[in-house]
Amino acid sequence: MSGAAATSTVTSTARTAAPTTTVTQTATTSESTVPAAAGAESEAAREQAAREEADRERVAREQAAAAQRPTQPTYTPEPRSTYVPAPAPVAEPAPQSAYYENCSAARAAGAAPLYRGQPGYASKLDRDNDGVACE
């Protein structure tokens, strides 16, 4: 049989995500000119090509499936609230020095009675020396 033509067609259809692939290989051999070892090598090459094509199709299917899978939501913790105390109220500063000439002046200023240690207290305003002036 001289000049015989061998044709093999590999058709594979992947799932909807991958396109259809058709591979056609045609080899023309002459039995008288090609040794048997060359035919075996040619067959091994075709098998290798078929395996590589199957691997490419498998990878394409996996990539398509991965693209269609919904992504998992990631956990994001709520920010921690930290306790910040309110600022302390600011007290009205007491006048550092006050002077009342007599108890009538202290009463007119609304400061009477004056206690020992308070601004404006003077021993001359405390007649009985009990620590309370202008009583």
Image (cartoon, rainbow, N blue to C red):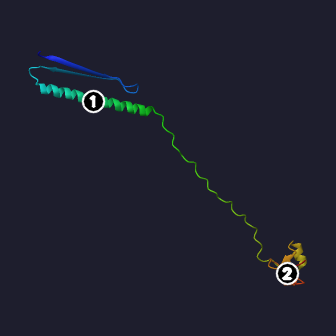
Q: Position of residue 76 (x, y in %)?
A: 54, 46
Q: Are marks 2 and 1 in contact (CB under 8 Å)?
A: no
Cα gap from disc 2 to disc 1, whole angstroms? 109 Å
Q: Is residue 80 left or right of residue 74?
A: right
- Which one is in front, 60 or 126? 60
Q: Is residue 69 left or right of residue 27?
A: right
Q: Tag 1's secondary structure?
A: helix
- Which one is in front, 111 or 64? 64
* Among the 4 quarters of the image, the one containing residue 55: top left
Residue type at numbered disc 1: Arg
Q: Nearer the viewer, mark 2 or mark 1?
A: 1
Which residue in the protein does label 2 denote? 131
Tell me which numbered mark, 2 or 1, is placed earlier along the sequence: 1
> In the image, what residue occupies the spot 39% across and 25% down?
15
> In the image, what residue occupies the spot 28% across and 31% down?
52
Give the answer, above or below, for where 32 lies relative to 48: above
Q: Is residue 92 left or right of residue 130?
A: left
> In the image, what residue occupies the spot 21% across and 19% down?
7
Which residue in the protein does label 1 denote? 51
Give the answer, above or below, for where 91 lies relative to 113: above
Q: Tag 2's secondary structure?
A: loop
Q: Position of residue 43 (x, y in %)?
A: 19, 26
Name the quarter where the C terminus is drawn.
Answer: bottom right
Name the quarter where the N terminus is drawn.
Answer: top left
Give the tally of numbered discs.
Answer: 2
Residue type at numbered disc 2: Gly
